Image (spheres, rainbow, N blue to C red):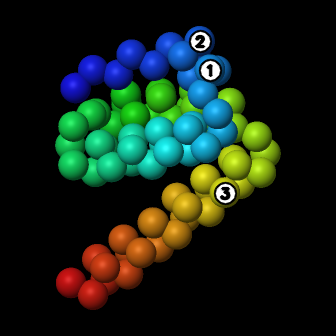
């Protein structure tokens, strides 16, 4: 899968669209459609465009998902 998200394209998106794009990026990474280094680069680009409030919201989502994964792994 090819991701052509230039800075210009990302800057044209709303905050909600950026958050949705990050959620989709997480999903694509989880199912193996993109590589970790590509995801990390895109996440850094998108993260730099988020407002402080939305950046904090994103960090909470990531922490919650990590905790859930740890709980699931611990239960197995």
Q: Looking at the image, is 22 positioned above or below residue 56?
A: above
**At x 20% / y 43%, what residue is drawn?**
32
**At x 37% / y 28%, what residue is drawn?**
38
Q: CA distance from mark 2 to mark 3?
A: 23 Å
Q: Secondary structure at mark 1?
A: loop
Q: Residue furthest right?
A: 52
> Residue 16 appears in which quarter of the rendering?
top right
Which mark is first along the chain, 1 or 3? 1
Q: Secondary structure at mark 2?
A: helix
Q: Is residue 68 left or right of residue 73?
A: right
Quadrant of the snapshot with the N terminus = top left
Q: Is residue 44 left or right of residue 65?
A: right
**At x 28% / y 77%, what residue is drawn?**
73
Q: CA distance from mark 2 to mark 1?
A: 7 Å
Which mark is first along the chain, 3 or 2? 2
Q: Position of residue 35 (x, y in %)?
A: 28, 33
> Residue 7 appears in which quarter of the rendering?
top right
Image depth: mark 3 or mark 1 in front: 1
Q: Looking at the image, is 40 positioned above or below residue 62?
A: above
Q: Which of the labelled discs sits on residue 12, or is there none?
A: 1
> Residue 24 appears in which quarter of the rendering?
top left
Q: Is residue 18 left or right of residue 21?
A: right
Quadrant of the snapshot with the C terminus = bottom left
**At x 66% / y 57%, what residue is drawn?**
57
Mark 3: few, some, or many residues within 10 Å (few <14, many ≥20)? few
Q: CA distance from mark 3 to mark 1?
A: 20 Å
Q: Position of residue 69 (x, y in %)?
A: 36, 71
Mark 2: few, some, or many residues within 10 Å (few <14, many ≥20)? few
Q: Position of residue 17 (x, y in %)?
A: 56, 38
Residue beneath disc 2: 8
Residue beneath disc 3: 57
Q: Disc 2 vs disc 1: Cβ atoms closer than 8 Å?
A: yes
């Amino acid at each position: 899968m090819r991701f052509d998200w230039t800075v210009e394209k990302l800057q044209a998106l709303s905050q909600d669209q950026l958050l949705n794009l990050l959620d989709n990026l997480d999903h694509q990474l989880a199912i193996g459609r993109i590589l970790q280094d590509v995801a990390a680069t895109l996440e850094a680009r998108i993260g730099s465009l988020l407002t402080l409030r939305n950046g904090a919201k994103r960090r909470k989502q990531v922490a919650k998902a990590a905790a859930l994964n740890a709980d699931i792994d611990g239960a197995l």
